[in-house]
Image: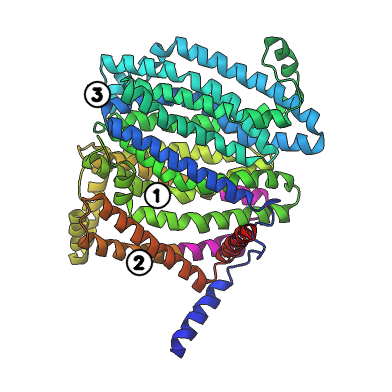
Amino acid sequence: MVKYKKFWYKLRRLFQSSNSINRSMFDFLKKKDSVYVVMILLLITKILGFLKLRTIAQLFGATHELDIFWAAFTIPDMLFMIVVAGSINAAIIPIFSEILHKKGQEALDKFFNNLSIIISWTVIIIASILFVFTPQLTGLIIGSESIQNMLSFSNRIGVDDFNLFVNLTRIMMISPVLLSISTLLTGYLQSRKKFFITSLSPLFYDLAMILGPIIFVAYMKNGVYGIAWSAVLGSLAHFLVQIPTFKKYYKGKFSLSLSTFKNAIHDSQVWRTIKLAVPRTISIVGEQINVVVNTLISFSLAPGALSAYKFALSLHMFPINIIGSAIAQVSLPNLAENCEDSKKFGEILNKSIQFSLFLVLPIVSVFLILRFPIVRLAYGTGAFDWRATIITAWCLVLLSLSIIGQTITQILLRAFYAIKETWLPLLAVAICIVINIALAFWFTNFFSHYYDWRPIVKQMTIQISDANGPEFFSVLHSFVKDISTWCSVRGDSDMAVGGLSLSLSVTYFVEGIILAILLNKKIKIISWKETIQPALVKFINAGFMALGMYFMYRLFDFQLDTSRTISIIILTVCTTLYGCISYWIGCKVFGIQELEYFEKYISSLKNKVLHRKK
């Protein structure tokens, strides 16, 4: 027993050296509860998001018609992402914060009005042009014979699909206009650190997307058009919910009239914002190219592949949107305020990274082990059959690997935006665009040849282990040749869609590394002691958690009838509970200090509740 205690004592001492993070974790938050409030609201939003997709899955399953909807959604979504969404964090919020703290409320209101005029009219004009020329644009994207022949999906695009694509795109072109104005309100309120109301906007959007399909599709029988109108309704709700709080703080005269457009053009701060936003806008264009390429590639795969990919994409965005977005949102104004103090800036950034890893790594472990039960519980109803479950779970397990990369990337990008450096991240994005496009083609080809990889891996392992001397190199050469063939020739397996997921995971991993290197050259803040070593400890702890969960999952899988929903719920809850306990024990053993802060916060929250009851 004494030896046992000494072993754990030494192990704990070994890893405690990595915990250089100050015990007052997140003291950089003026209101340390802010990140948790945002997380809770984003959690509710994601739950509604699951209900939204579950409703759509129940009504349509993973079908070709739904594939057309997701493809049509790409164009209006691209317009919004390029013009507004990309610049909101890169330029708009940092400039808003700077003007508010240096020049005051009146200057902020004047700048907001001028910027709103420029962006709103830009979106309205572009949306109108796209609305008029949607048939021509559709012909370029999915009607081009050369593109269809190149990607081998001409047999899946017909005249009816073409008309459906055009009509859906035109309906949803209303959304980016509403969302653009609404997102400017979001930036204004977040610069004032009003995170609660801005987090309600996506919540109301998803709520409309749940009720909309029930009304328009289930009762009014509008088919997939009902989802398009639901998106418009959600965009309107996203905008309206922020109006009362915005009017409380905004003291200027808000106007989008053409008569004030001239004054907005001559505002130097507007041009400064546009200048800062240009690199991020270019990055968004590149990212949207990836979206278009992945959409086109999906049409060369089995029917329903794009829908399965989208369903898995939504699931894997759960921790990214809740944890990564919450921490990034709350950190950005604080990073911007301390951009001239490199020590304080680095402290805020490292705390953000470590706390995000502490929260997302156990979720990644859960997704990796419980992918099938999660997909079945999330979408397994109505038209969503077992085939759709298998494909979606396959996409989810490969997308799970990107959760870490995307979470860290969000925080690193905010660090660049806080110091008003928007050109350097463009380098990372440009490299990753090329990587993603190339890997998307290779991996979809690679995964299109086999349904079950276990016999293949076993066969290769035996061949390599039995080979001696020159035979080893012969087997290795044959293996490399087969891999090359699989990457260049398309098979017929439904598993091919996993290539889109794996390419995304690899791309975000590479982007995170490049961003960290570039940021460290700009400001020396990434170090072994404060960044890498404590992160490595968390990875090891999450690995132990995943290993234990795997054996627990297999044990329950053998004992329970997983064709029944109640059995799936029991399996998921018990395995997840075991994983959480394992992760908590590991944090204690390895001395992971974020747990101590988390426990103190829960304890203080409990004391507040008990005090109020008294």
Q: Which residue was labeled with disc 2?
A: 548
Say if residue 471 shows up in the picture.
Answer: no
User: Alpha carbon of mark 2 to alpha carbon of mark 1: how far?
Assistant: 18 Å
- Answer few, some or many: residues within 10 Å of disc 2's Cα (few below 14, many 20 plus, some between 14 and 19): some
In the image, is residue 478 part of the stretch drawn in magenta?
no
Q: Position of residue 125 (x, y in %)?
A: 56, 13
Give residue 400's mark: 1
Give residue 156's mark: 3
Give the magenta part as a residue range: 516-540
Query: What colouring style does the render use?
Result: rainbow
Q: Decide which of 177, 247 is in the foreground and name it.
A: 247
User: Alpha carbon of mark 2 to alpha carbon of mark 3: how far?
Assistant: 44 Å
Say which element carries label 2. Answer: helix
Mark 2 or mark 1, which has the lower sequence index?
1
The residue that appears at 46% across and 70% down in the rendered structure is 585
Say which element carries label 3. Answer: helix
Which amino acid lies under the numbered mark 2 shown in the image of this protein? Gly
